Amino acid sequence: MEGLFFNVNNGFLEGIVRGYKSGILTQSHYASLTQCETLEDFKTQLSATDYGNFLANEPSPLSTSTIADKATQTLVDHFNFLRSNSVEPLSKFLDYITYGYMIDNVVLLITGTLHERDTHELLERCHPLGIFDTMPALCVATNVEELYQSVLVETPLAPYFRDCLSAADLDDMNIEIIRNTVYKAYLEDFYNYVSTIGSTTVEVMHNILAFEADRRTINITINSFDTELTKEQRAKLFPAIGRLFPAGNNALAKADDIDQVRQVCDNVSEYRSFFDNSASGQSNDLGDFGVAAQLEDRFFRMEVHLNKLAFLQQFQYGVFYSYVKLKEQEIRNITWIAECIAQDARDRMHDFIPIF
Amino acid sequence: MGDDYPTLFRSEQMSLMQFLIPTEVAHDTVAELGELGNVQFKDLNPAVNPFQRSFVGEIRRTEEMTRRVRFFESQIQKEKDVVPIRPLYDSAPLLTVGPSAAHNIDELDVTLAEHEKRLVQMNDSYKTLSERTRELVEARHVLRETAVFFEKAETQHTDIRTSFDDSSAPLLQHDDREQQYSSTVQFDLEFIAGTIDRTRISTFERVLWRVLRGNLYMNHTDITEPFVDPATNTETRKNVFIIFAHGDALLAKIRKVAESMGATLYPIDANADKRSDSLREVTARLEDLETVLYNTGLNRRSKLVKIGENLARWQDVVRKEKAIYETMNLFNFDVRRKTLVAEGWVPTRDLTMIQLALRHATEASGTSVVPILHELRTSKTPPTFTRTNKFTEGFQTIMDAYGIATYQEVNPGLFAIVTFPFLFAVMFGDIGHGLIIFFAALYMIYQEKKWARQELDEILGQFFYGRYIILLMGTFSVYTGLMYNDIFSKSLHIWHSGWDFLEPGSNGVSYAVSNGHMYPFGVDPAWHGADNGLVFTNSYKMKMSIVLGVIHMTFALCLQLPNHIKFKRPLDIYANFIPQMIFLQSIFGYLVVCILYKWSIDWSTRDTEPPSLLNMLIAMLLSPGKVDANAQLYPGQSFIQVVLLLLAMVCVPWMLCMKPYFQWKEIQMIQGQGYVGLSHHNGGHRESTDEVLEGEEEGNGRVIVEEMEEEHEQHDFSEVVIHQIIHTIEFCLGCISHTASYLRLWALSLAHAQLSEVLWSMTIEKFLGMSGIFGTIILAIVVVFWFSATVFILCIMEGLSAFLHALRLHWVEANSKHYQGEGYLFTPLSFAKLDEKE
């Protein structure tokens, strides 16, 4: 039934977002991008894509950060166009997408303040999708309580922070804990919210969010090896959703090394390939760090794959989320290639994650 | 054919030419060809990336120059007072061909870079200066507002003091100390003053309140005038705020929050004298700064004016250079890399002009090596190029919008020049409305030279583009208006009417009797206002639209013939054209003959009622051979109808089977001779010269593959069959529906006539009888209203609807009879068209 009336409010925006999606760079674009000798070539090459003349008015010595900024700006413009044309419940859904970026910004600001960085410099580094009015005031706060009381209480993030008010003072470890607690709360909330807006959306979004949650769980586990984080604390940080929940989460909470993580992941067929080293031919000499780096790459691949699947279904909101995520990945790819060109590291240039 | 006078009937004959251009004259040659605008270059390196081509460096350079020119343009546009840009036709051309070209371009590059540098410098200094001015202005505001605030507070303060005087509170202890220091200021609270963006003030207040847990007193007022950012020209509005709080920790927090929220803080002294001192100082500094700022602005402006004089010229040069190098990127180098090889489509007729241009380019560049031009033989379909002028352009565009004619196909755009305005006018027939749009078009043509140079807005531009169409539409409408005898829904009495009205009888009805006259042209005005007038015009217009429709379709069908003859497809004449013609004529042609025959008979002298032609046609199809004696039109009707029907029936299998059969036989014959599929045309398909083969080897192969696929399609027998089946069904059903479709001529013309009559009778007619000054005034108002309604509703709205219907009749009803429209447009390199693209 929801398909019947979906187009009344969201048909236009779905059309727009699918149009945006077809502008995402394809394999052949990447093939020609990787052949570029200089960033000037890169610019010429990009102007033949949907990015168009987004760099046309930049004076000549281009830097990779300009390219990344401008590319992000196109994403933000697209997103804002969607956001300002949307109505409930899509607008709420889109807001939820921004919450993730808001959390990142908050954590970035707190960490920056802790290390006594310049506030304005920090503000510039914030992701433009996650900016909110009272954000600058974050740098005044010195403990979580104050943070919550003075700034966060009126943002949509407030309920997520409520759980971590106990963390007394701000240090690197605690900030990391806060980030993960907040993110866990956010994911769970988003997951629940998605459940209220139509069955097709649920189907698509639950897949994506479940993977997101599992990815965080695995990451937290691996990162907490050999740190002060106790196993009980670790278990608290795991989102209570995802395909590893609950049995896998329990096992992960008790895991001591990467092999145990692998065993847990083997229970889910899609995740089995994450730790599969035989395909790449590089065996155990990578060490833990290498495995983690490779894992991250595979996570991104999986994410791209899931987000691509979202476009196979119509009449659902998942496409909006997926578009933002895919575009983000594309910006990472562009920046990576541009960086490789700038630093003349041609051998590593192909380590990006192709989307289409 | 190439020597014939150019015609719209078929598109130009094209030749695929190969240019061998020595590298040193390449630039000038392309420039010359671009001015000429007659060559469509083919991409000879489709496999090469844009940035791997030969002239990428030059393109990048021109792009950099374009960026600079764009920067100047945006700067000029941003300037509040208009900076004049000297138009292109007024400025001296910059020489970009010939021996000094490279030098000139280098010079231009340097000039542009210098201008940019200077402009950026000026902008920077202007920006810093205005930044400082802004700060000072803000400081002044803060000072003033705080002064106001303190004064106000002071009066209240003393009030409070007096009430406190009785109690010897310890709070007052250090009041004495303060009083020694300054008699007026009695505050021991520290405060912070500054300015902040107005949109942020509420957030700011909220955050502060929460951070300090309410331990503050904040006051803010609006600054009335907005601050303008010199770089972006955006206005920001700000507020002055003053915050009182106690304790260094709190103040530090306030400062931090304020700074991170983008507020500017100003050190303000609590002492009133000091405040007025600093106010004076600020004002003085502001005055100095403003003079400097004014001078800088003046300098910048004069610089911009100087740039504005040359801007159009630069834009032109840069644009052309870019187009030239982009074209040169399509070329191929020969083996020794001394010559550029180019291929392109050229109208055969213009070959001499191109040769002249090539020679001219060589002379201009001062070398003696002439580019070589020779023709290639190819089996590729050339692009469609129809030479138009300002008159035919509009009509051709209408037809091109449906589909570009196949190469050398009969071009319906030629006939549209007459048929389009005519069919429009059949629907729009009114002398008055016709005259209005005629004069509107005439005015646009009169203004042509002026308007062509201007940027018109979208709607006006559309009308202006179709001014000659409108002109003809107006003329034809006057003609059909005369035929219908309609002028603003009234009729003209030019000749004697053929009818006399008798004195009204007892029932108040007056009958008209024929007086033997014949009204020589158009509808007799006596019909206007007659009770059966509508019945008469309806029957008349309905039949007329059928007649016109069948004539139009027959004509469109006939246009197949020159195509079949030209492309040597005799089979199509026998298998398509002839049966289609017989089918159409035996049913609908017969109907038209009947209509004309029925019109020619004086039914009042016959003893039978006039038969209904519609019923006749239906009976002819449903019960062939039977004609009701009452409804007989002429003797022998049933026999003729049966024969015609049989003819039409025969045509269907004829159309269906003949073409596939003969094609099948042809394939059998070819196979019988031992040829198989591809080898059949590979032998004769391309007698390529060595250079072309070379080109193919270097990556031109893709094109050939496409070509073969294209050829192959036609030999697929099942596709021929399916195509023919679809074609037959489409034609037979189409004949019926298309004939009915022409009834829109009647419907729209009726609607138009009725609407204009309603407009007349609802407005002017009611007020015509009034006399006196009052009546005249009312009449004048009503006439104005009526006229504007006539223009907007009848001429523009109705005109647009009639236009669309005429368009449809051409696109669907007529074009489907003969038009293939599978060509692609000739898009030559042309500097003249560069402007339009942007």
Image (cartoon, coloured by chain):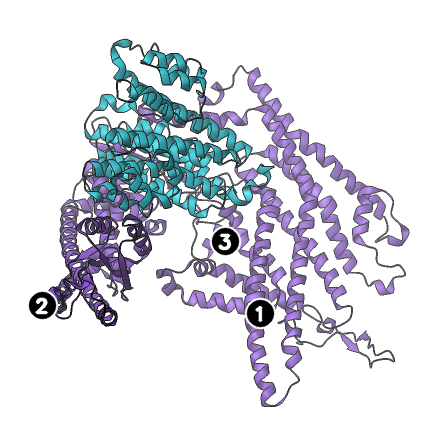
Q: Are marks 1 and 3 in one subunit?
A: yes
Q: Are marks 1 and 2 in one subunit?
A: yes
- Kindly indicate the quadrant of the structure image that contains residue A153: top left
Query: Mark 1 or mark 2: which comes first in sequence?
Result: 2
- Mark 1 or 2: in front is 2
Query: Which color was chain B given?
Result: purple
Mark 1 and mark 2: Cα distance apart in space: 88 Å
Q: What chain is colored cyan? A: A
- Chain containing the residue with disc 1: B
Mark 1 and mark 3: Cα distance apart in space: 26 Å
Relative to A249, is B451 above or below?
below
User: Is residue B44 visible in the rendered structure shown here?
Assistant: no
Q: Is residue B611 left or right of residue B78?
A: right
Residue B311: x and y in percent read: 22, 56
Three-letter amino acid code at disc 2?
A: Gln
Q: Is residue B369 left or right of residue B642?
A: left
Residue A113: x and y in percent read: 22, 39
Residue B395 numbered mark, or none: 3
Q: Are marks 3 and 2 in one subunit?
A: yes
Residue A293: x and y in percent read: 28, 20
Residue B180 numbered mark, or none: 2
Residue A324 vs residue B263, the one in the foreground: B263
Cβ–Cβ below 8 Å for labels 1 and 2? no
- Location of mark 1 (residue): B790
- Residue at 54%, 48% in the rendered image: B412
- Chain containing the residue with disc 3: B
- Mark 1 or 3: in front is 1
